[in-house]
Image (spheres, rainbow, N blue to C red):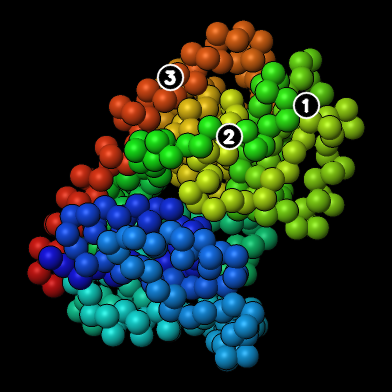
Amino acid sequence: MAKILILIGGHLCNAPRPQKEAETLANAGHNVTVRGFWFDPELVKRDRLLIANKKWRFEPIIDFQPTHRLKNWSIRLEGRIAREQFQRFGIFSPGLLGYGAKAMLKIARQTRADLTIVHSEAGLWVGNQLLDEGFRVGVDFEDWFSEDLLPEARAVRPIPHLKALESRLARECTYCLTTSHALAKALAEAYKAPKPMVIYNVFPWAERSQIDHQKRDRRNPNLPSLHWFSQTIGPGRGLETLFQALPYLTFPVEIHLRGNYPESARQWLEPLVPSTWCDRLFIHPTVPNAELLSRIAEHDIGLALEIPYCLNKEFTASNKLFQYLQAGLAVIATDTIGQGEILSQLTAIGRLISSNDPLALAQALKDLIQTPNNLTATKAAALQAVEKQLCWEKQADNLLQVAELALNDKY
């Protein structure tokens, strides 16, 4: 079978989509290696747990943990110089796209895989270089990188260069995936390219057998419980809408947020929470991948309050939406095009509301909670949708078909 290399821009535990990709390709008999980067010792532990007893491998390209800081100072310096040159003179270099882009290219050349699949911004540049050298390349647009981030962040990003890198990969890679039909259409139109294969950010139905049925988050099991999670708690993720909706709620609920919670986030969040709700708001740290589904499953309603401040947010369907469904939660999601693609077809799984609309969120919560049968039926519909449609088992064949086509391409 084929040798396949998957390149990611960070820790394996923060990359659920490449994990499922690697598992599927390895189960089909391919020799699969994932290469990324290490930064955080705690996340390194989670990475090691993830790869135990797998048919595929993960290896860091560079270890940036604090104990290796001196060893890697030159790569950090290279990134800083790249940013300064771009901001002052408009000069593009791969160091703008993340630490270790050149090291990633070196690994890809050494591996000489039959198919190299790229996921990150740095991977876009690596993929273009590999195409120049005659390698077979695949790309997963799990984000539309050139159309991501808030305007102030985009102002210092090499947007035209990212678009050029994306355009070539979209047009020339047979193995070309993305996260929603809306994003597939947008990419095809923007780059005059074939539509990428849509692989939703869904999760295996079989993982539900690992739910531990413990109650580690909830304090009062008699109150309905709302859950929201992201890698980091902070502004621009829809939490503002949640806090603004609380004064309109006339019934008690528990609110559970999960994510990294730095001091800057605490200073931002605390003034937004009405004083009468402080004793029902709980902040939880991130947990290992194997535990996340269990912790989500403790709750009743998952909040996917994405704000469409850029085209990437508008078109993609997020991981959290599908993990809520996998856990058997009813969902309340803002009406981005990507999330609307799911909830407009499966209306029974939750409520679709306008973004930045606290009154709409309060009304959706009232609809679900004040009629208990509604919440029970919605949670049951969510599980049924996952089992029959929105699970990885239903997506895997499409991924394998695209991989087979790409591996049979003559370069």
Residue that label 3 marks: 381
Task: Identify which amino acid the numbered label 3 is placed on.
Answer: Ala
Left or right, 407 with respect to 108, comes to left
CA gap, disc 1 and disc 3: 26 Å
Q: Is residue 124 visible?
A: no
Q: What amino acid is at disc 2? A: Gln
Residue named by callout 1: 246
Q: Name the spot of residue 142 as percent of width and height, x first.
A: 41, 53
User: For the residue labelled by badge 2, is the local secondary structure a helix, a strand or a loop?
Assistant: loop
Q: Residue at x 36, y 85 (%)?
A: 106
Q: Indicate left or right for 199 with 30 as reference.
A: right
The x and y percentages for residue 178 are 35, 50
Examine the rendered structure and indicate whether residue 209 appears above or below residue 258: above
Q: Position of residue 94 (x, y in %)?
A: 47, 80
Q: Secondary structure at mark 1?
A: helix
Whether residue 309 is situated above or below residue 296 in the rendered picture: below
Count residues near mark 1 (Cα–Cα under 10 Å), then give few for <14, some for 14-19, many for 20+: many
Mark 1 or mark 2: which comes first in sequence?
A: 2
Q: Which mark is residue 68?
A: none
Which of pointers 1 and 3 lies earlier in the amino acid sequence? 1
Number of the label disc, if any, that sits on residue 214: 2
